[in-house]
Each structure stands twice: as C-alpha cells, then as structure tokens.
Amino acid sequence: MRRFATTLTVCAIAFALTSSSGYALGRFNYVGSEACKQCHKEIYNSWKNSIHAKVYDILKPGVRPEKKKEASFDPKIDFRLDKSCMRCHVTGWDQGGFSFENPADELKGVGCEDCHGGAEKWMRPHQNKKLKNRKRKLKQTGLVKPFKGITVCGKCHANVNAPFKDRPRNQERDWTDPKWVETYHILK
C-alpha cells in the first residue's frame, strides 16, 4: 500500500509540474523567433518575410479566398479559433508554445522553434560558443537539428489531415535532402 501511495504521489507531482510549467520530460517551452534575431539576423529577416512567418494570418476571413475554396472551406470564416488548424499555423501548438490560453503574438506563424524545438532550455547554452561539450549539451536541452526534412517539414507539408493532402507534393523540393534544408533559411 505504501508503494502505491508513493507512486501516486510521484505521478501527482509530475502532473502538477507538467500542468503548471507547460513542459514535461523532453518538452520545453517556446520563447518566440524574436529571441533568435540577435545572433541570426539575416536568417530572421528572411524568415520574417516568408509565408511561414505569416501563415497564421492566412486563417483570417477573406485572406487567400481562392486557396480556401480549393480546400472546400468558406473563405468568410475565421479559422483562428479552429484547433485543427493550429498544428501547422502556430509555433509549438500542444507542446508548450502557442495555445488559446497563451495566444502570444510571437508564437503566431511557423517560427524557428517549430523546426529547432522549444528554446527555453537550449537558448543559453546555444549563445555560449565556448561551452565545453556544447553540441551534447544543446541536444540534451532540446535543440533539434532538423535535417531530416520529411519529419520536420512533413509534419505540415505531408500531413494526411491537412486540407491540401490531395495536392501533388511540391516536386522542386526534396525535404529529405540536407543541402536543401540548410539553404532554406535564406530566401533569394
């Protein structure tokens, strides 16, 4: 009985920590792409002008009506409160990032952390270039090196639940090619 009570207590504490802090083991809170700007200015500016940065606004009524009609959606509807859209239109949905309870502007759109993981824990060691065992520590604190494109990009672009799933995949992009993924950041 005592063992059961201990196990129950540990589970309750873990639940409380997860509920109150927003992250559990392997899950880190999101800080927003603005935090990346200081060191990655060119990449940030390129992203800021990209469709990824603005993809949340696509959900507004009247925006890109032809694409919404193509997906059999009413272009007059505001989809910003539709949970089924959030996975691909905000940063960190259901992972400690954007939520309806925390609708932070810096988490609207697909940001840096959608590919690199929530930066709450890895930001400080990432900024310390002289840190001993830096790569290992960054990985331990949640930094993702997303050069397996189909798993990162594909969570939205190849999502079977996306309204555009029947559209042929964009053939000029090979999301599994690390060279393409590495050059993605800088728009020409």
Image: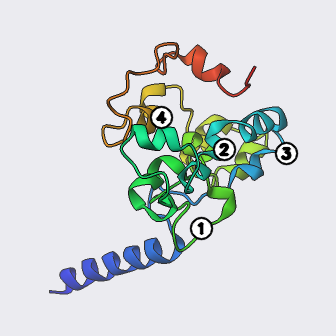
Q: Position of residue 25 (x, y in %)?
A: 44, 59
Neighbourhood count class around disc 1 (C-alpha, 10 Å): few under 14, some 14–19, many 20 upward: few
Q: Residue at x 20, y 86 (%)?
A: 2
Residue 22, how many percent across, how many down?
51, 68
- Which dot, 1 or 3, sits closer to the camera? 1
Q: Which mark is residue 38?
A: 3
Q: Given contact means CB atoms under 8 Å apart, are the residues at marks 2 and 1 in contact? A: no
Q: Is residue 176 visible?
A: yes
* Distance between mark 4 and mark 3 Cα atoms: 24 Å
Number of labelled discs? 4
User: What label does residue 152 carry, if any?
Assistant: 4
Q: Amino acid at mark 3?
A: Gln
Dot 2 or dot 1: first in sequence order is 2
Name the residue that disc number 2 marks.
53
Task: Give the residue type at disc 1.
Answer: Pro
Q: Please name the residue that numbered disc 1 is placed on.
A: 103
Could you give the CA–CA distance between mark 4 and mark 2, rounded to whole angstroms?
A: 16 Å
Q: Earlier in the sequence, mark 1 or mark 3?
A: 3
Tell me what residue is drawn at x 58 percent, y 41 percent: 116
